[in-house]
Amino acid sequence: MEILRMYKQDPPRGMLFREAVYEPEDGSLMVTKGRVGHEGTVSIRENVDSTDSQRLLKEFAEAGAGEGFAEIPEDQHHWVIAQYALKSKDGTERDRYLEHKASTAIGTYFAWRGLGSVEESGFSPYKLNILCLVPDVKLAVKGIQVAIRESRLDFTKLSIGSAPFADLEHPVRRYPLPSRVPFEL
């Protein structure tokens, strides 16, 4: 899978996004665009082979650059961490199901709205961490809350933190607030 994600600041409306995703398995190229945080419009092109995909992705990038869109360098992104408190140190089978379900829900919600991507998930003692790489922290925090609620997952054990790309070791709690407990991975 090849993904090309581009953004543009649009002061009265917020940030705009354009995203092209090529799936070599089924030969489809999906283009999504819209305002970050809102469901974008989608167009799908079928029967695209690998040589056509490279040309189409290049044209997509050039057209986006012509309209003022650009890829955001990874070091300018932020980490947003969805964290679940667990009853066991290593996680149970039910916790692994929660990891899969929550990661999928957040990843799908983010993809349709240009909010970023789920990069990894894993267990630490008594915690499940889902790490997302995002361009806008506030919109991503709201997006995680909506995705978890819409998926009918347990909202009571959820905490959300954020950190700059280069400083994942020192996250700041974003939800729930106020809290006297610091956010730790």
Image (tube, rainbow, N blue to C red):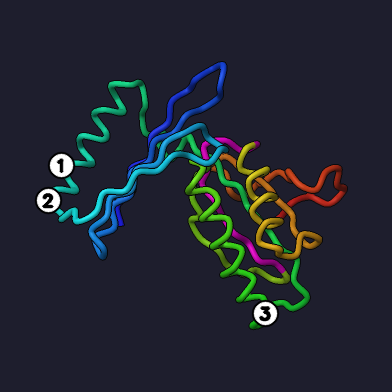
Q: Residue at x 45, y 38 (%)?
A: 75
How far across and down, in percent of the image, does residue 72 sit? Answer: 41, 34
What is the spatial separation of the Cα atoms under label 1 and label 3, in whole angstroms? 44 Å
Mark 1 surroundings within 10 Å by alpha-carbon count, few (fewer than 14), some (14 through 19), many (20 or more) = few
Q: Residue furthest top?
A: 12
Query: Alpha-carbon distance for marks 2 and 1?
Result: 7 Å
Numbered disc in front, either 1 or 3: 1
Looking at the picture, how far across and down is residue 171, in whole percent? 66, 46
- Identify the secondary structure beneath mark 2: helix
For the point 49% across and 50% down, which residue is it? 117
Residue 146 vs residue 22: left or right? Answer: right
In the picture of the structure, the residue carrying the numbered disc 3 is 94
Q: Is residue 153 magenta?
A: no
Q: Which residue is mark 1?
A: 55
Does residue 16 sit above or below 91 in this rendering? above
Q: Are marks 1 and 3 in contact (CB under 8 Å)?
A: no
> Residue 42 at x, y = what percent?
40, 43
Task: Tell me which secondary structure the magenta stretch mostly adopts.
Answer: strand
Q: Are marks 2 and 1 in contact (CB under 8 Å)?
A: yes
Q: Quadrant of the C terminus?
A: bottom right
Front residue of this view, candidates 145 and 125: 145
Amino acid at circle 1: Arg
Q: Residue furthest left?
A: 51
Find out whether residue 128 is within the magenta segment.
yes
Local packing at callout 2 (Cα closer than 10 Å; few below 14, some 14-19, many 20+) is few
Task: Compare marks 2 and 3 and give the one earlier in the sequence.
Answer: 2
Say what amino acid the circle numbered 2 marks: Thr
Query: What residue is at 68 percent from the left and 49 percent from the top?
Result: 146
Q: Which image quarter is the N terminus in?
A: bottom left
Kindly identify which residue carries mark 2. Answer: 51
Q: Secondary structure at mark 1?
A: helix
Give, as a single range, the part of the protein colored magenta.
127-138
